[in-house]
Image (tube, rainbow, N blue to C red):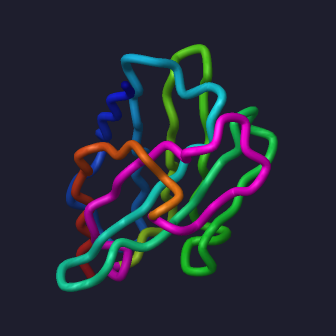
Amino acid sequence: QVQLVESGGGLVQAGDSLRLSCAASGRSVSGYTMGWFRQAPGKEREFVAAISWGGGSTYYADSVKGRFTISRDNVKNTVYLQMNSLKPEDTAVYYCARETTWRGVVLNTERGRYDYWGQGTQVTVSS
C-alpha cells in the first residue's frame, strides 16, 4: 500500500509561484513514474506533469510547459511540482499519483495508468 499526501497549495495572484509537495508513505515510490494531475470545477481531471522513476525523464502538458517543473527526491520519498508564472486558468485541485508499472519506461498521461492518488491540494490563482 502507498499513501500520498499533497501539500503546498494556496491562494496566490497571477504571476506568483507555488511549490507543491507530495509525500509518500507506506511503500517506497522510488521505482515508479510519478505524475501530477489537476481538476478544475466542472472539468475532468487532466494531466499536468510526470517524472520517471529515476528522475531522468520528465514530460509536461503543453499548458504548463516552461512554467512548471516536476522533480523528485527518492531518498525522502517525495515528489515536487514547482509552479511559476501562475495563471488564473491554473486554478484547480492538484493531485499526485503513482503509475502502475514498476520501473516503467513510458511516462503515461492518462489517469487510468495511475493506481495510487493523493487527496489533492487546492491552488487558486486570482487575476
In the depicted structure, whether residue 85 falls above or below residue 5 = below
User: Residue 59 appears at what percent x and percent y?
Assistant: 70, 61
Residue 80 colored magenta? Answer: no
Callout count: 0
Residue shown at the point (35%, 46%) measured from the top left? 117
User: Residue 65 appears at what percent x and percent y?
Assistant: 64, 71
User: Residue 105 appears at what percent x and percent y?
Assistant: 79, 49
Residue 90 colored magenta? Answer: yes
Q: Nearer the viewer, residue 63 or 45?
A: 45
108 lies left or right of 13: right
Residue shown at the point (31%, 79%) measured from the top left? 44
Q: Nearer the viewer, residue 123 or 32?
A: 32
In the depicted structure, whether residue 108 falls above or below residue 3 = below
Q: Quadrant of the N terminus?
A: top left
Q: Nearer the viewer, residue 89 or 117?
A: 117
Instruction: Give the quadrant of residue 26.
Output: top left
Residue shown at the point (37%, 74%) measured from the top left? 90
Residue shown at the point (25%, 50%) measured from the top left? 121
Instruction: Give the quadrant of residue 91.
Output: bottom left
Residue bounds of the magenta highlight: 88-111
In the depicted structure, whether residue 25 falls above or below residue 63 = above
